[in-house]
Amino acid sequence: MDELDPVLRRAADALRQPVPPDPAARERILAAVRAERRAGPAARAWDWLRRPRAVMVSPLAGLGAAAVVAGLVALASTSGEPDRGGGTARPAALASPAAGYRTVQFVLVAGDARTVTVVGDFNDWNPRATPLSATGRDGVWSAMVALRPGPHTYSFVVDGRTWVGDPAATPAPGDDFGRPSSVILVREART
Amino acid sequence: VKLRTLVVPALLATAAAASRVSAQDARLAARLDPPTSAAVAAVVDSARREGLPAEPLVQRALEGSSKGAAGPRITASVRALRERLRTAREALGPAAPEADLVAGAQALAAGLDPGTLARLRALRPRGALALHLVVLADLVQKGVRPGAASSLVLDMARSRASDADLADFQRLFEADVRAGAPPGTAAATRARGIAPRGPSAPSGAPAS
């Protein structure tokens, strides 16, 4: 040290001098400490939750957690299911024929009817889902519906209350719950 | 990384499966009273476990609900349909598609016996049977005796009548019946017109 250049020695001596404390900084630090002491359990819990940490999970526990989440999702979707009597058809019934569906025309002659709908296993038997349109000629009502190939059971509902089987189709065998239904077989599209 | 590769697909698969089941249960829960919904869901679940189609059972319950049927009747009807689907599968084979099973169940409901379904399957070991089964049920529904209807349709299957032949037969038979012909006579007459793969039935059917 004795061999240091006088300039360096003066600099080293200056660095060894204690730094006078800043009174304002001291106040800020003490205020922060007092605030920390005043924080309640909720604030500490929030702080704990926000603090990142590593968690070790076994694959079995992960699968269990996945099952719980899936169950919650299922529960939420069940409780939030909209009323299907509201008048929207299932999207599947409206799929394009290109996806394997075939368009079927439903026709009913009902001269005095104000409304006619077709209801069946393609629209969850929703009496408001698939209205027929009056063609303007002799009380003929008609609707085009895309159906999956296979047998389908259906009825017409006239004026929202009268169930009518399709006079041009086969009556549905078995229990019809006292209101007539008909059967249509949609065959596979020829390729 | 390994944990993530295991858990994420499992989470997605489980959520998708739960979503499908809940959507179905939601339809029942939204339309049926709680005891009926629970009873029908149990029948649907048992059918699914057996590998039977579940959607026709759900639709039967929804049909009953829309038609204002009481809960016990809806449940009984869904149970009866499950039994017929089960019987149809035994007769038509485990590989029978849903359309054949549903049509088979309808044929059984119309009064045909499972033996007819099994003989039909034996005559056509491959290919869809839904059209044959729907025609069978139609004949019986319109008044042809089950035994006679079975003989006619089995003869048509034996003679390899095409689907178009069968559809023509059904259309002309219905026209004859609407015009006043006795169902048994109309069916036998029109069947002679197409078997075995003969010329098309005459087009002089009475207009409806």
Image: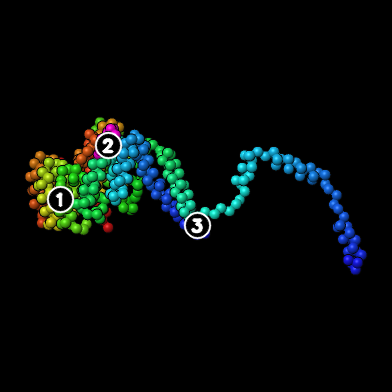
Numbered badge on residue B187: none
Choose mark 2 or mark 3, whichever is in front. 3
Please report the bounds of the magenta region as a residue range. B68-77
Residue A115 seen by the camera: yes
Chain letter belonging to callout 1: B
Horizontal and vertical percent position of residue B151: 10, 50
Q: Secondary structure at mark 3?
A: helix
Q: Secondary structure at mark 2?
A: helix
Choose mark 3 or mark 1, whichever is in front. 3
Horizontal and vertical percent position of residue B46: 30, 46
Chain letter belonging to callout 2: B
Q: In the picture provided, is B130 more to the left or to the right than B32?
A: left
Numbered badge on residue B3: 3
Residue A132 sits above or below residue B87 on the image: above
Query: Which residue corresponds to the image point at 20% horizontal and 40% vertical from the top-left?
Result: A174
- Spatial distance from mark 3 to mark 1, Cα to Cα? 55 Å
Horizontal and vertical percent position of residue B165: 16, 53
- Residue placed under numbered mark 1 in the picture: B115
- Spatial distance from mark 2 to mark 3, Cα to Cα? 47 Å
- Spatial distance from mark 2 to mark 1, Cα to Cα? 28 Å
Q: Is residue A9 magenta?
A: no
Disc 1 residue type (three-letter): Gly
Numbered badge on residue B74: 2
Residue A37 sits above or below residue A159 on the image: below
Q: Main secondary structure of the magenta part?
A: helix
Q: In the picture provided, is B90 more to the left or to the right than B195?
A: right
Place residue A107 in its image quadrant. top left
- Position of the N terminus of chain A, as image quadrant, is bottom right
